[in-house]
Amino acid sequence: MTRARIPGLICVLVLLGILVAGLAPFERPRNTVTWLGNQNGVRFGRYGTIWSAGEFVVADAQGEASCSLEIWLQPDSASASSTLLAFYTPQDPLQFLLQQYHGLLILSRQIVGDQNRTQIIGTDGVFRRLEPVFITITSGAEQSAMYVDGNLARSFPGIRVGKQCAGQLVLGTSPIGKSGWPGQLKGLALYQQELAPTEVFRHYQSWTTQGRPELSGNERAIGVYLFHERTGNVVHNDVRSGIDLYIPKRFTLLHQLFLEPFWKEFRPSPSYWKDILVNIVGFIPLGFFFCAYWSSVRPIKHARWTTVVLGFAVSLTIEVLQSRLPTRDSGTTDLITNTFGTFLGVRLYAWKTARALLAKLY
């Protein structure tokens, strides 16, 4: 009787192991944003994010959209690949992403209505050293430009990103995924116009010497954040009646993806193929032991196909639940690879040598 229970116990343990591996941790982690304490600013950890308490609007009365963005920061890693700032709207979650990719500063924007085309601009050498860097992005009627420490790094004629500088501001990660940026944020400002090169340099000098921008009154600032509170969960806007920033207690994404299509999940990187392999191998035991149980211990009709359907159902359950966990990704790639792994486990059981070894175990 005891030996007859062993196959069922193994099936239960395999299923529990897969569920734990697919869903742990089972709750939202603490938001790892901490005040620097002895100076103005905050530090972002692995799961750190800050949101604006409202949505920014940059278009003027004529519907034109010009903007400038200043951000004073210090990266913790020269090899990070993550999002440090984004503007989010439910209609277009990826409309504006400011990212670090190793030493590169990248601005990525999605253009809705043009087959969701993504446009990327950037400049190199910004994050090569782990030192404070002052970045300015300007966009007007004719071009956009990137400045580093008050000096022009690159200009992009014909490219305008002003309309994308609107919506809810997200700092420290992407609005749709756990793309945490490790580093310190010392200051941030948003303007409803394109700053001139002389204004960019003057602001760089005042930020880095006085800890705040020296405004002449003509820059049309709509958000200035000095991060001088050093405690609490609110970063106040230095612009009167402006939008404050909020530090959530728990790490949460504004837009959790649900069963993202596999063609959008594809990444030509070693980590992507490693995840594929892990997902396939991880479900082979489920296919093998459940097929064995339903074939020899508790025989049922169509044991092989029933096992494959079970693997699909377990994977689908995990992906649905992962859509509620900000540290996990819900996508169809895992659904396909997990089901394929279950199928390989079923095929492994059909191998006579494998069945002989299993008989000795039982």
Image (cartoon, rainbow, N blue to C red):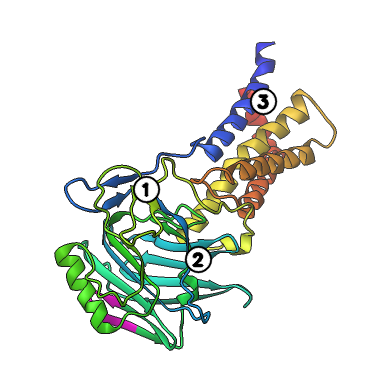
Kind of residue at badge 1: Arg
Could you tell me which quadrant the N terminus lies in?
top right
- Asked which secondary structure carries label 1, the reply is loop
Crowd band around label 2 with a 10 angstrom C-alpha radius: few (<14), some (14–19), many (20+): few
- Asked which secondary structure carries label 3, the reply is helix
Could you tell me which quadrant the C terminus lies in?
top right
Distance from label 1 to label 3 (Cα)?
Answer: 46 Å
- Asked which secondary structure carries label 2, the reply is loop
Which label belongs to residue 268?
2
Q: Which secondary structure type mostly characterizes the magenta part of the structure?
A: strand
Which mark sits nearer the N-terminus, 1 or 3? 1
Q: Residue at x 77, y 30 (%)?
A: 295
Q: Report whether 13 appears left or right of 252.
A: right
Residue extent of the magenta highlight = 147-154
Nearer to me, 66 or 346? 66
The mark closer to the camera, 1 or 3, is 1
From what the image shows, is residue 227 above or below residue 307? Answer: below
Kind of residue at badge 3: Ala
Q: Which residue is mark 1?
A: 46
Kind of residue at badge 2: Pro
Distance from label 2 to label 3 (Cα)?
Answer: 42 Å
Crowd band around label 3 with a 10 angstrom C-alpha radius: few (<14), some (14–19), many (20+): few
Which label belongs to residue 359?
3
